[in-house]
Image (tube, coloured by chain):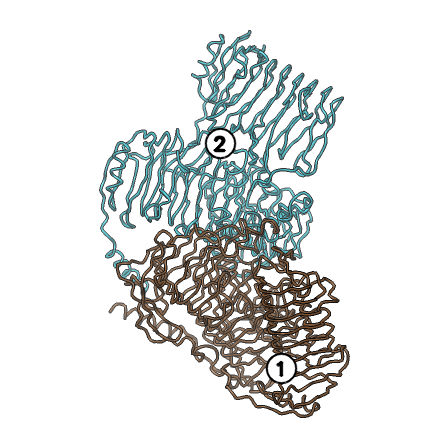
Chain colours: A cyan, B brown
Amino acid sequence: MKKTVCILFLSILLIACKEETKNNFIKVTNIEELNTAINQANPGDNIVLANGIYKDVEINFRAKGTKENPITLKAETAGKVSIEGQSYLKFGGEYLVAEGLHFKNGFSPSSAVVDFKISNKDTLDEIAYHCKLTNSVIEDFNKPKRDNSDLWVQFWGRNNELSNCYIAGKTNRGPTVRVSIEGIESINNYHQIINNHFGPRPVKGGPSGETIQLGNSYTSMSPSHTLVANNLFEECNGEVEIISSKTNFNEFRNNVFYKSEGSLVTRHGNYSIIDGNYFIGDGINKNIGGIRIINTGHWVTNNYFFNLIGTSFRSPLAVMNGIPKSPLNRYNQVTDVVVAYNTYVNCSSPWQFGVGTNIAQADVLPKSEIRSARAIRTTLANNVIYNQKGLENIVIENDKADGVTFKSNIVDNQGLAFPDFNGGIIALSLELKKVSDNIFIPTGIPSEIKAFNGFDFNTIKTDLFGNSRKDSNTIGAVVNADVANPNILDKSKYGTSWFSNIAETKDPTTHIVTKAEDLQTKINQANNGDIIAVAEGVHTLNKSLVIDKTITIQSQDNTKAQLVYSGEANTPLFSLQSKGKLSLNNLILQGNNSNYAFASLKENMANHFGLTVSNTEISNFNYVLKVYKESFSERITFENTSISSCENGIELSEETNDKGDYNTEYLTIKNCNFNNVKQNVVDYYRGGYDESTIGGNLLITNSTFTNCGANERNKRLLNHNGIVNVTISNNTFKNNNVQFVSILWGAKNNVASNNTITNSGQIKTEENLVMKLMY
Amino acid sequence: MKKTVCILFLSILLIACKEETKNNFIKVTNIEELNTAINQANPGDNIVLANGIYKDVEINFRAKGTKENPITLKAETAGKVSIEGQSYLKFGGEYLVAEGLHFKNGFSPSSAVVDFKISNKDTLDEIAYHCKLTNSVIEDFNKPKRDNSDLWVQFWGRNNELSNCYIAGKTNRGPTVRVSIEGIESINNYHQIINNHFGPRPVKGGPSGETIQLGNSYTSMSPSHTLVANNLFEECNGEVEIISSKTNFNEFRNNVFYKSEGSLVTRHGNYSIIDGNYFIGDGINKNIGGIRIINTGHWVTNNYFFNLIGTSFRSPLAVMNGIPKSPLNRYNQVTDVVVAYNTYVNCSSPWQFGVGTNIAQADVLPKSEIRSARAIRTTLANNVIYNQKGLENIVIENDKADGVTFKSNIVDNQGLAFPDFNGGIIALSLELKKVSDNIFIPTGIPSEIKAFNGFDFNTIKTDLFGNSRKDSNTIGAVVNADVANPNILDKSKYGTSWFSNIAETKDPTTHIVTKAEDLQTKINQANNGDIIAVAEGVHTLNKSLVIDKTITIQSQDNTKAQLVYSGEANTPLFSLQSKGKLSLNNLILQGNNSNYAFASLKENMANHFGLTVSNTEISNFNYVLKVYKESFSERITFENTSISSCENGIELSEETNDKGDYNTEYLTIKNCNFNNVKQNVVDYYRGGYDESTIGGNLLITNSTFTNCGANERNKRLLNHNGIVNVTISNNTFKNNNVQFVSILWGAKNNVASNNTITNSGQIKTEENLVMKLMY
């Protein structure tokens, strides 16, 4: 009763105190009117952008609302106002809200698309406090050059919010969202990044492709208190870190990481809380990660890991080795970390310790690079693991886990024995209860097995679903398996009220081309996914075909149509442009020895291209494929294809500034026949030492190379300097005038097997590559 | 009215909830009874130690009190229970209080005298929470060997307290008080170190002599929240850091630093609050420091600095350069620091920036040692400086202060012009208002000069005296100069209720000795400070005289008495033992060429010795002075004394483990005459590179060296390797068969001037000494 009275009193007081809410609508139709409205804005004003396209608008939203009466900048109809061209939105001041905007078809001329700071001037209204962007979309808003770095949302100040937005498609350098905390105005910021849908961010092909980065190593000692909660991360594949936490006291709660090639990484900074998140894999893609731990004091609790097969850096739980007395920008030792009440279902390597140990490289790396400091004062307790297929080890020790205490962890390993770490990992037979397609809860832990009550464990108050742990002694992420399906993959729960990234599936249209001169026209008319079928015969073209959409070009019939390219020297038959994803099938391509079969653009490759060549005969080109700097394709594949009498082969080697970048994630050559390709037969380059750039994938298999590499200056047939994953298998190398078929990087995942080498030099392995340090 | 009702309700509720306070007294008289009482203790129990001496007691105070009913371990009469011999007190559990104890005449056999942890066992009652030591004394409780490290009070756990204690006299390695925060049990500890009197801690002669150390570099990323408040630090001279803060969020409030040779240093860790402290110098001693800043986010506010003449590391405000991407245990850059509302009166170098820059040493030091990163995003605002004698520069830039913003700082520089940093330092004529002998408040700032309102400056709510800043726009530490004398040096306000370190001043007694055999007896009978007067004539002694107190030995009349020492080879005439401080005046000392004039003990030098030799003739000894390892004297002085025909001179060179230690802080040789001293004429050694060990002081002046150094192997007459401060001036060197009179360390404070050198080699300067890195 007393409580009720108190609440009543309080409510009356609050109502009495509250200022009257004003509602003044000011409609604007262009940037000039908008600027005027902003300049004159008073608390409670609603500035309404009339529906339409706003091009090349630099919006400095500098104003001062109040808590009760914020100033709002909103679309007349959410989603019907698009911001295009060279545009940005910057906030400065207090209690400002922007909503309903669609950023597309453009890029920011500044360092950010949405910035919570207007300038570096030393006055308070240049930085944002209590401001938010909500119910908006930022889509493919890429700078034209990959190396030109920017951010799509940059936080400064305090108490700002990014909520209910859809953000996808960033390809250029720089995290998608960044919280900057240089300066006392931005520490203890309590920013909120909530309820967003982070749609696909394609692989960047090098570092600096995080979806969220919180601070950097230089501010890693500062308190941030940023909350990242209830977001969906879908295919956020930019780089090895989806979220890179580099400040202190950040919280990651109830997010869903779905088929995202990367991990949530506590890269710098300390005392993160990672609670109640879902990490959902597909059981196929090894790049989908979990949580990677560096530094001190993190609590990883109530998380759910499903169908993850990543290992090492990409393990569901990867605890790294640190560098003793580490430099500020490298790896501090893991200490005082708690991993408790998590559930792992069908993960092939749930826990790895000593990840990143490189003691073996002590001879080639400086002492300040050697990660030899193992995790200490770290506790793994009350976790549950269910493996449909038993594992040999539950714990993988890349270096000893002797500083880790295991307590009351339960594993159903299908009866297979495993090291139990002083009884801290207990084998049991459990049952899976299905909650949804991706959520299965192991049940059946007998009540006599008590949860370990570690220091401060009483602060873990709820479980994965938010149910109280107070009266429960349950091990694992879930207190009670009798729960409704939380529908974590229902996209309508995240992002805007008006935008969906669910594409309609549509059958492709086939466009038949009988004359060479119609080819470009038909391509232009085609929709994404359509097929161009070229009639039998010889078609001569003297101009490049522009490929700027997803398209397949193939022969109309089984008989290969032939495209003869007579265009200028150093121009390509197929010009692979931004968003141009070409599949070629069953064709004959012939050049004039001075021009190219395929090439990217030299600039304006804001979005990725793609190339798959199947069942095709290629001859008489200067280059088969020439990829220029800052172009990127997720996959380049040649299969069942012959390449002959070309000066150069497949060249992706212009990322020579050694910042870890490269031009394709996967270069695949299967069942191909290379004959008389004089140099750059395959040249695929990544430069710069950075252990966290773990990409570049070259597969050459079941192919034959004959009389190739005659003009290769470095006397290597296959060049793949710095590529981390290389497989060369089941190939035949015959009469190639080189010294080496390949030089493999032994310390990385470079392997060769089952190759037949005749009169073609040898395959050599160098354990450690000498590379430029990137930092 | 409503408020009153609320408070009433609340009070009733609180009273209702409070448990009944129990008061059960258990008197114990020995350790067995004490152990039993502890084992059986219940909340509310008072275990009373009967008055007396408890020797060799290892007290493990393991029990569980409650907030309302703590368990107390107290002296029957505060101060009448002394803990002696090899003893310690350790706390484990909750709500425990120890009070009224006197630790003296002994040392801890463990790593701490008072420890807030009993063992490393993995159970919660081994660590202390809500425990305190109060109203107690720890005095001269030194391990017998200086290199044997310990702590006198070591904090672990959370919410523990050291209050109203007197702690003084630590000489051995290790901080006096340390807060350890390894492990989650000890972070966010909110310990309180309050109302204590930290009495003299003599110079240690090397590092690891802090009075308070909070954490270490390995835990420097963890939140500590330790409060150090209302303490008096009197002559805490142990080393260059009085307080070394190495964790985050510590607060230093309202402490008085009085004639303490050192500084409050934010060595590692970040976001300290240093508010309302007094730093009082004497205008003479250059070693008395202020606040030295490293790292990020500190706020230095409302402090008062008086009569400080330190410079560089020991400046009132010393802002250091950092090392770019510093290793964990070195120097991070200073960023986001605020220094506001402080007052400086008669400080000769109030503000120094770029302290510790060593860019010039880039050739001899590794890159990871070069402090080249200047302070950035740092604000100095609303400070007041009053200089009785105008200074050429208010700001000393060891490296540029270009990352520092100066705003609304007021200086009375007696009309002397100075660089004003973009108008951020304003010259004015002020008046001093005297509050006490050490507190003078500059007044007379016109109200039109407004205080700068920096970001978050509204969090500075009060001034030096605790008066509100709310309605004030006052620049400087004090809002209103009309205040009562706060009596900051009234020692009764700090420490215990029963102990005072104020010594009675007593006129010395003169004891006349006419026969050699009475000498030791008289020395034994004498009190500290007394004088032994030796009658004219020749007195032969064959046994060492034990000196273990402060005593003066001199001739009874003007005519020098002669002491002839016939004791065994390698034994000293004067055996300088722990606490033995000898002044010798107007005597003749003669040996047998194989024995020594003065020597320390080889071990058990738990407390410092001292030696002053004046107007004395010394001859025919093997060693004039031999100081063994781990012996330390604050001062060793020879003046108006002749030393002749000795094999060795003054040797202090056994600290060869190169950890920065040395054997005397000041070695002074004035108006002396050295003749035919064959080797080790002067040999004074410090080894190990550590830029923060800034001691060792050698002064040789107005002296003559003739025919010395003939047997010196390294061909140097004066050896002072690694001594930071060396002055050799106005001396005459004649016919000494050496290559060098001295090799000076150019990078440090080594100077020679006005010396006359004849047939004695030369004085050379080497800019950079190659030394072993200590860390």
Q: Residues within 10 Å of mark 2 (few under 14, many from 20)?
A: many
Disc 2 from disc 1: Cα separation: 81 Å
- Give the camera-side residue of B451 and A585: B451
Secondary structure type for disc 1: strand
Secondary structure type for disc 2: loop
Q: Are marks 2 and 1 in contact (CB under 8 Å)?
A: no
Q: Which residue is mark 1?
A: B584
| Among the 4 quarters of the image, the one containing residue B550 | bottom right
Quick one: which residue is furthest to the front in this view?
Answer: B758
- Give the camera-side residue of B739 and A46: B739
Q: x and y percent of residue B729 in the render?
A: 58, 66
- Position of residue B773 relative to residue A536, above or below, is below
Q: Which residue is mark 2?
A: A146
- Give the camera-side residue of B408 and B94: B408
- Which chain is home to disc 1? B
Q: In this view of the protein, can residue B224 be seen by the observer?
A: yes
Which label number is shown at residue A544? none
Residue at 74% in and 72% down = B647
Q: x and y percent of residue A19 in the render?
A: 24, 52
Q: In this view of the protein, can residue A444 be seen by the observer?
A: no
- Give the camera-side residue of B617 and A605: B617
